[in-house]
Image: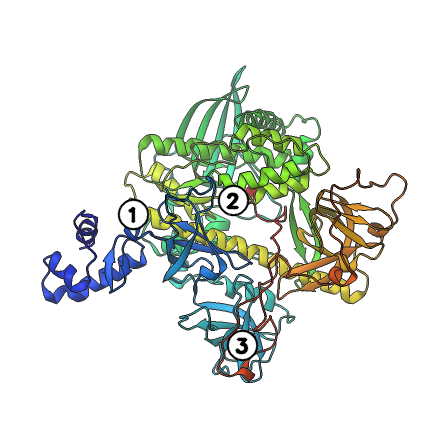
Amino acid sequence: MKDQIIQLLERKDYLPANVLELLRLLTLPPHRQQELQAMLRQLEQAGQVARIKGNRYIQPREADLIPGRIRMNRAGKGFLQPDDASLKEIAIPENATSTAFHEDRVLVRRDVRSKGLRAAANEASTGTVVRILQRKRTQLVGTMHRGRQFLYVTPDDPRIPHDILVPEPRDVGRPAHIGDKVVVELREWESRHANPEGEIIEVLGAPDEEGVDMLSVLRQYELPLHFPKPVLHEADVIGSTVSARDLAGRLDCRSHPVITIDPDDAKDFDDAICLERVAPEQWRLWVHIADVSHYVKPGTALDTEARKRGNSTYLVDRVIPMLPEALSNELCSLKPNVDRLTKCVEFLVAADGHVLNTKFHAAVIHSQRRFTYGEALAILERPPTADPIEQMLHQAHELAQRIRRLRFKAGSLDLDFPETKIRLDDHGRILRIEKTVNDVSHQLIEECMLLANEAVAARLMGLGKPAVYRVHEVPDERRLQEYRQDVLSHNVPCGNLSHPPEVQKLLHRLGTLPIGQALKIGFLKSLMRARYAVEPLGHYGLAKKKYTHFTSPIRRYADLIVHRAVFDKVAAPSAALKETAEHISVTERNSADAERDSKDLKLFAFLKAQLASGLPQPYAALVTDVRNFGFFVDVPGLAMSGLVPLSTVEDDFYVFDVTRNQLVGRRTRRVIRLGDQLTVQVAKVDSGKKQVDFQLAREGRKEPDDHARRPQGAPQRSPERLTPQSQNRRPPHPQARPQSPPRHFKSATARPQGRGHNSKAQPARPQIPSSHSRSKFGGGRRRR
């Protein structure tokens, strides 16, 4: 019936028809009407048909209706990723998002302009949400408040600007107090001009109660704490050791000097490497990946749960694994001194780093040593000893650096920023914050994994088998042009960024300039976000036409699919793979948001404690944007960004020079501009809005000396003058929840106070990305 409906709607002579008319056109008997209606609902939810006026059905494109998934930003604007991969992203203005939430599947009517009116070549495509096809989530976490007449819940997610009206909680297991964190079940929401309604189904506790912060994250992002019993039972039945029966048909690599290099706290060792010289100018490189597909078969409870989770999630205090620990940390993990099954890519590599030949094997290994990145780096920073494994490590490093140079020569972009790792004490408080630099030990493994991912993608494309690819699409030309104009405004030479070599030149140039790091952060804003797709669209950031994910099947379902596609004889259905690719793209973004929020909550508590002590710590900061109300800074030591309001800068009265986009001290002539290095300390923490304001620390307030930078020449026009009142009057923070439209309550006295109720919305400031947030380029090194 599904195919019949699609074929009918594709006919050139088809006119929009309702259910009864479709029943007749399809020559179906009357008793199949309910079956037809059910199929139409299914197709409508999938975005394959659209229901228009008069409950008539049509192909979506015929009415300029585009199905897809909407993503919201904190200013309330939406961006539709169409189901059709050939269509570009569609921007949805804040007043056109209807009742859509972040990650909902929606139907958007695309704005079509008259061909007689010549639009700008790079003008963004826009549209309006006309229907919610499927809610991503029906439960939200927030803080309970009481208005004059009603209870309401403020969502933790700043992308939801509406408070949720709730009745008094009942049968929730514990008493609810004003200010508690709660879980709300949403009811139907018909109009964005009225607040959504819901019901409190769980009380988590006071926000500062131990454990409530992480429990809020788990509930907000629907992360499971436990595996279903059938899943655990299947994992137990598999056992804990590799049996002789498992070795049949495998390449025996147990005598090879195989090693692993992972973070010091890792337990799920996905990958291992081995290198040997086979000729004076040739090397054989083995990249071994845990053979999860041998144990997790399609259709089993293990596979169903792994697909549902999509990936492992690494919160600040725990891991939510994709697979039970009996597999993820034990039988599948490539631990040293035990036999383990792998899928292997064997490379013959020339001494200059070029790949000469590639083979694929099912193998068995016996890892001889487990290194942490710190241990590997220590070995690489000194001459090798007589230990053969240390010598191999040095040889692998040298080869990896040659492969890396070739990759950048081919156009790969260098967008690595230092990442941070938060260490907690036994009470869940921050003990220390460590910087993780992409040093040569990380690069060694990174280059081997990228090589394997590319080789497997080429293999899949050669076989013509349906699979899932990792794609990073070319940036929107309009965004690149806007970024180019920003760069040029700072007197930095910049070519046509639609040509990748010009992007490389710019990034190299920025690496030599004081302002470069700030502008490099800005480049991230112009990039698309990497995702999964069944079409091999290539990877822009890595400059690879053929790319997939193969190297982490313990923690990514995409890699498990790819393992099956390469080595299994039976191919998965294309339609099912497309649905899975979209699903795991969503779960990856969900996990990235959860990981970021878990870090932020700990950092907010850490900074609040500093404020309470009266001894806030100083932090080095980089100015990333300058406005008339203050300047934004990126703080590497905290892995976050924030605003320094001018109202907190006390050493002078600062005037905003619009022409040069800089702040100038009226008395001292001190200049604050993009790229400046300053010292700041925390001034204010707003956990509800998920924002931190900073102020100049004592070191950052000293008078400029004779060498202090001053404005170069007189401005062409007078800088915008700021009155003391205007310096203290601040528009909404770019990371704050935007002001929502007027609430519609049952009575005027019933409106809860706070969050700008019935207040006129002010223009939101731009969101300034932190260099430490997961890059759209690939979601950080772990997600490339």
**Which residue matches tag 3?**
152
Which of label 2 and label 1 is nearer to you? 1
Which of label 1 and label 3 is nearer to you? 3
Residue 783: mark in rendering: 2
Which badge, 1 or 3, comes first in the chain's sequence?
3
Query: SS of the residue at dot 3?
Result: strand
Which badge, 2 or 1, comes first in the chain's sequence?
1
**Residue 239 visible in this rendered orientation of the protein:** no
Q: CA distance from mark 1 to mark 3?
A: 42 Å
Find residue 358 and report its horizontal and vertical position in percent.
Answer: 42, 26
Decide which of 219, 273 is in the foreground and name it.
219
Position of 253 relative to 432 (above/below): above
Residue at horizontal 21%, vertical 48%?
A: 10
The quadrant the N terminus occupies is: bottom left
Q: CA distance from mark 3 to mark 2?
A: 38 Å
Question: Is residue 348 rendered to the left or right of residue 394?
Answer: left
**Which residue matches tag 1?**
575
